[in-house]
Amino acid sequence: MIDYHHQISSSLRTSKRKTSQKLHQNPPQNNIVLNKLRESQINGNEGVNALMSPFWIVIRQLAEIEAMALSKKVITREEWEKKLNDVKIRKEDMNKLVMNFLVTEGYVDAAEKFRMESGTERILTLFFFLFPIMGSDIDLATITDRMAVKKAVQCGNVEDAIEKVNDLNPEILDTNPQLFFHLQQQRLIELIRNGKVEEALEFAQEELAPRGEENQSFLEELERTVALLAFEDVSNCPVGDLLDISQRLKTASEVNAAILTSQSHEKDPKLPSLLKMLVWAQNQLDEKAAYPRINNLSTATLEDPAV
């Protein structure tokens, strides 16, 4: 007579051994089901009897599927470069992307030179599949006045910058109280930088304090700025960063964006947004696959995946 019990037991032992090998190769963490299967290896015949249950056979199969799902797909450099080469981007679109950056950031000479070399006769707001909104044309001549304002702020000539903004469009500062406050704050910072303590205190009291009474965030920024006067050595001042060139650049960028908005142009170039999108997309893909990624955006060099 055939010993069916013996055959079933032998078959389950073999199945259990294969499952153990797969689990050893791809060991998922914190899995109750797989822990139960490991216990069956330790308990000998008791484990075999447990696995004889149809329930545990199904569970074993599900555990194998889960273990396979946890492993990332590996994409080789050859495969990845082929995928990249399959993506076709028109040179015209690339020219618009470069021109969009040069115009928005105000590089007049570079924009004019690029226009001539690339054959880009008209400067258009980037029309790209990720940003399907076509803007109006931008004349290079209009950039000059905007850059004069930006340069004045960067050099610390805030009064001159305010006059130039009002010459361009008086409504810019009238309709943007935050921008006007930040320009006045920068003016106060320049007075403190030049050691004009009494003039700085008078300016803060007459020009900025009334605005601080109307807006809590303005008041906090004013208090932070005036705190510079309490320190003879600003290198030890907790708000010493206000005297850094980065503060001037921050205010200048805010003014530049406001002028662009008033002219119905986009205030931010597309290129930085695309780079941020690239970083985000790579972070999402990291969870599912190992592939050649770009870690250094300045060189855009593909680095092989660690496997």
Image (cartoon, helix red, strand yellow):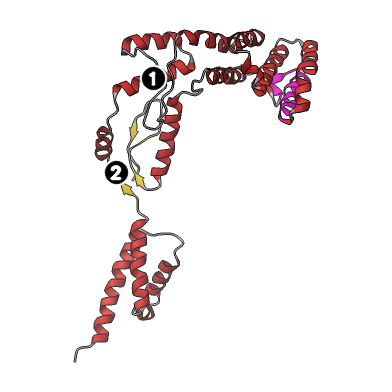
Residue 51: in sight, yes or no?
no
- Dot 2: within a 10 Å radius of its alpha carbon, few (fewer than 14), some, or many (20 or more) residues? some
Who's the residue at 45% across and 27% down the image?
Answer: 272
Q: Quadrant of the N terminus?
A: bottom left
Percent of width and height locating residue 233: 73, 18
Q: Nearer the viewer, mark 2 or mark 1?
A: 1
Q: Which residue is mark 2?
A: 75
Residue type at mark 2?
A: Ile
Which one is nearer the viewer's eye here, 92 or 107? 92
Disc 1 marks a residue whose amino acid type is: Val
The residue stretch that appears in magenta: 217-237
Residue in the foreground of this view, choosing between 258 and 68 = 258
Q: Which mark is residue 98?
A: 1
Q: Is residue 180 magenta?
A: no
Q: Is residue 50 above or below residue 175?
A: below
Picture layout, residue 110 above or below residue 175 = above
Image location (x, y in percent) of residue 171: 63, 16
Q: Is residue 241 above or below residue 79?
A: above
Query: Which residue is at a point 69% across and 16% down the rendered structure image?
Result: 184
